[in-house]
Image: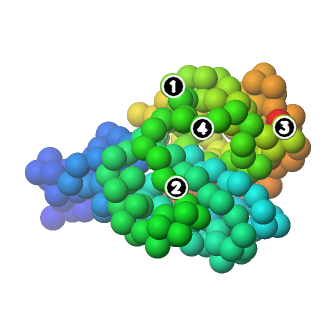
Amino acid sequence: MNQGFLRKILLWVGLIPNSKHIARQLRQPSGSSAEKFGLLMNKANNNLYDKIIDILDLQGGEKILEIGFGNGRFFEKLFKKTKNIKVSGVDFSESMINSAREYNEELIDDDRLELLYCSSNAMPFETGIYDKIFCINLIYFWENPSENLREIYRVLKPGGKFYTCFRTKDCLSKLPYTKYWEILYDEDEWKNLLEKNNFNYLNKIIINERQVEMMGQKVQLKTCCMIAEK
Ligand SMILES: C[S@@+](CC[C@H](N)C(=O)[O-])C[C@H]1O[C@@H](n2cnc3c(N)ncnc32)[C@H](O)[C@@H]1O
């Protein structure tokens, strides 16, 4: 049997997920596939987290917020850099929050980490309390980016930094499931949006990643980590 035909049959009987399902699970993992997608994201983004945590350049004493942390397997990497930080995380997937809370029980009990179930456009935090806020693979899912950016700006300290880490439009647009996401950005589009929402652009770091193969197509992944200041 030829491979294309076999794939169509497997898709049809639901043995391999279709693009719409993948897109939905990456946006907001839920139901019986949530755990599996959380682990897949860990595998895909482990090295990326290492690089981005280096870029955060933690000095100790900071208050950090991660938005859209998935199953939260990487918070321990932050504390390996320095123990003297306070970390919050928000995510709007109930499955991911439950998994992350279970995995990070010790950090939470020690009062070093708090994880909240909410959306980034309405976060229950006081104004001006975070030194550094970061998100990885999140912005493609925002229906109203300005609403989210206003909220992030509000909870940042004056002079605080926002690190947006996203795979760029040129590579993501080649993956079949991304057509179901809200929007893909290139570097200039995201920079303009940050500036339109009062952030001062500081700089960007490009991370060239591995090549992935999907449905017969090879895609060279590239992440932009853009740093802006309040
Ligand atoms: C593609 S996953 C990325 C997970 C992780 N950052 C990574 O790169 O492996 C996106 C995560 O962001 C969360 N998310 C998406 N939109 C959100 C929003 N508006 N507010 C909070 N969390 C959101 C999803 O629930 C999901 O856990």
Check disc 1 and report the residue beneath it: 143
Residue depth check, mark 4 versus mark 3: number of the one nearer the observer: 4
Q: Which amino acid type corresponds to the residue marked 4 in the rendered image?
A: Phe
Residue at image coords 70%, 64%: 85
Secondary structure under tag 3 reads strand
Residue depth check, mark 4 versus mark 1: number of the one nearer the observer: 4
Say whether disc 3 or disc 2 marks the residue closer to the N-terminus: 2
Q: Which amino acid type corresponds to the residue marked 3 in the rendered image?
A: Pro
Say whether disc 4 or disc 1 marks the residue closer to the N-terminus: 4
Please tell me whether residue 184 is drawn above or below residue 174 in the rendered image. Answer: above
Of the pair 15 and 156, the residue shown nearer to us:
156
Secondary structure under tag 1 reads loop
Residue 75 drawn at (x, y percent): 56, 66
Circles 3, 2 touching at the beta carbon (< 8 Å): no
Residue 205 drawn at (x, y percent): 80, 55
- The residue carrying pointer 2 sits among few (fewer than 14), some (14 to 19) or many (20 or more) residues within 10 Å by Cα, namely some
Q: CA distance from mark 1 to mark 3?
A: 26 Å
Secondary structure under tag 4 reads loop
Is the residue indicated by label 1 positioned so its CB lies within 8 Å of ligand 1? no
Residue at image coords 31%, 62%: 36
Check disc 4 and report the residue beneath it: 125
Q: CA distance from mark 3 to mark 2?
A: 22 Å
Instruction: Kindly identify which numbered label has been placed on residue 114.
Output: 2
Q: CA distance from mark 4 to mark 2?
A: 12 Å
Say whether disc 4 or disc 3 marks the residue closer to the N-terminus: 4
Most extreme residue toward the bottom is 80
Q: Is residue 167 left or right of residue 214?
A: right
Q: Is residue 215 visible?
A: no
Circles 2, 1 touching at the beta carbon (< 8 Å): no
Say whether disc 2 or disc 1 marks the residue closer to the N-terminus: 2
- The residue carrying pointer 1 sits among few (fewer than 14), some (14 to 19) or many (20 or more) residues within 10 Å by Cα, namely few
